[in-house]
Image: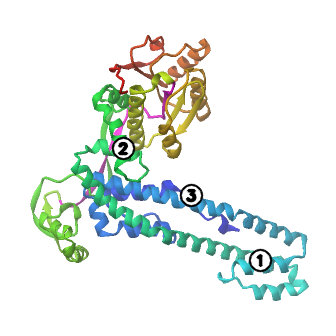
Amino acid sequence: MAGLTKKKYDINFYAKVVEKFVQTGECAENAYGETEDPLYLYLLSIMNNPSIKLQVLENEVHARIFYDITTQFVWQFLEQEKFQMQRAQSELGEMESALNWIKEKRDGWQALLRKIKEDYKENAFDEPFYEHMFGDKEQQHDPSVWEKMLSDWEDSFQQKLQEQKEKNLNDRKDFLEKKLKTSLSKIPEYLEEHQVEQEEFFQAWSMMNGLWNTIDFESIRKIVKLQKEYPELLKVANRMGRIADDEGSKQVYVTEGSVYKLSHSQKSDILGVTTGNDLNALLPSELLYYSDSELQDVFMLKYFTQKLQTFRYKSEIMQPSRRLEAKPAVLKGPMIVCLDTSGSMTGKPEKMANSLLIKLIEIAELQDRECFLISFSVATRTIDVRRERQKLMEFFSHPFTGDTDATRMLKDTFRMLDQNRYMNADILLISDFRIPKCKPELIKQMQANREKGTFFYGLQIGIAPNDWVEYFDHMYKVEYQVSRRN
């Protein structure tokens, strides 16, 4: 039953396809050796749309909007497909049972054929042929006949799944395409009108699951803005992200071959004017064709016939492409954020903590690092912030309350380090540090992990006495003005 083990692509596969497109503009159909998967082919059709490509490669904001909306669409589609596969498990079990019928020579083939005929009457299952074959008692116990019947059953099963997948995709296409069109147009307009900085947008947008609305955006943006009011928050984020200049990182260029490299930065070595369809080198006059709805057809015709007027550069367009990579002196492990959610953190401390958490999530996404949140007061809760976004949204909606006890939080942290064998983890404890000291054995375990390469950082919000400083690699501190409007 080889077809049942047919390779299924996960969210990471599709995300890499989209990521490569927004970075380079490449979306070759044979790049990944896949020609039958309807979701993959649909993504290619979107990415090969000149209008979409032009907008996505225009700037990083458009690229980010496209990436997040598209990957969110893929994730939802795969979740639906996963649900349908779970419903199909009972039928897979029946196929396995039928294999035993071959060995045990049991009767019951009539009922089985009726079921297959009913379920796959539109999928070319040849029920009359097998009814004739099994009507002969000798053929009825012939393993080769059963194996062929099971093979045809499996083929019909796979065909039906494929058709259902294509139907589900067709039902969702209009929604995605309208959402992309609206978002790529309206969001940049809003950002320009309200003078939203790019970094503010990236952080706030990352919390919105690709669902744009100005009320939620401005609410999150206010929290993000605290990073300017309290620069220490960014210092902590940079230390956790290991992007400080004194870390020993260096830039390395890696040759990748000769490809068309479409970047968001503009070239400065203009030599003259030529014709082609390089969207990154268009003359401003050509952009006018695209921006005018009545002239877009002219633009598309010139694009497909490579007649667009473009700048020509001394460096030429075809050249060995090089990717800039940062090679850190130390491998980056996961980031684990331990956040005190007790009642004493209510108000401004809670907002500052959430602002820092949003920034760290953005860094984790950019660096493709694992990032976990362990919220604690007396009880604890652990969230994989990159994979459990719904739980993260629920966390942000609940107020901070209760007493403080670091015992369970430290135990959960050490358990996570040990079970996953994490190396070079960066652990951050955010609190006002009105925390009773833990038992000596937990402090010793903390020191033992530091000796293995785990870094412990603390961010104290407020001016309470802090007896924990000596146990951390570095303790940051933020003071704030207490007011009734916290």
Residue at (23, 64) in percent of width and height: 279
Q: Place residue 436 in its image quadrant.
A: top right
Which mark lies nearer to you, 3 or 2? Answer: 2
Q: Mark 1 points at which residue?
A: 115
Q: What residue type is labelled 3?
A: Glu
Residue 462 included in the magenta stretch of the image: no
Q: In terms of secondary structure, where does tag 3 sit?
A: helix
What segment is highlighted magenta in the picture? 316-342
Q: What mark, if any, has residue 79 been given in the picture?
A: 3
Q: Mark 2 points at which residue?
A: 204
Q: Kindly tell me whether residue 9 is visible in this rendering.
A: yes
Between disc 3 and disc 2, whose residue precedes? 3
Quadrant in which the N terminus is drawn? bottom right
Does residue 120 appear to the left or right of 325 in the view shown? Answer: right
Q: In terms of secondary structure, where does tag 1 sit?
A: helix
The image position of residue 9, as x and y in percent, is 54, 60
Between disc 2 and disc 1, whose residue precedes? 1
Q: How far apart are marks 2 and 1 (CA)?
A: 52 Å
Q: What mark, if any, has residue 279 been given in the picture?
A: none
Q: Which amino acid does label 2 sit on?
A: Ala
The crowding category of the residue bearing disc 1, from other C-alpha atoms within 10 Å (few below 14, some 14 to 19, many at least 20), is few
Q: Do the residues labelled 2 and 1 touch (CB within 8 Å)?
A: no
Residue at (54, 33) in percent of width and height: 422
Residue 331 included in the magenta stretch of the image: yes
Q: What residue type is labelled 1?
A: Lys
Q: Kindly tell me whether residue 30 is visible in this rendering.
A: no
Does residue 53 appear to the left or right of 195 in the view shown? Answer: right
Does residue 422 appear to the left or right of 310 in the view shown? Answer: right
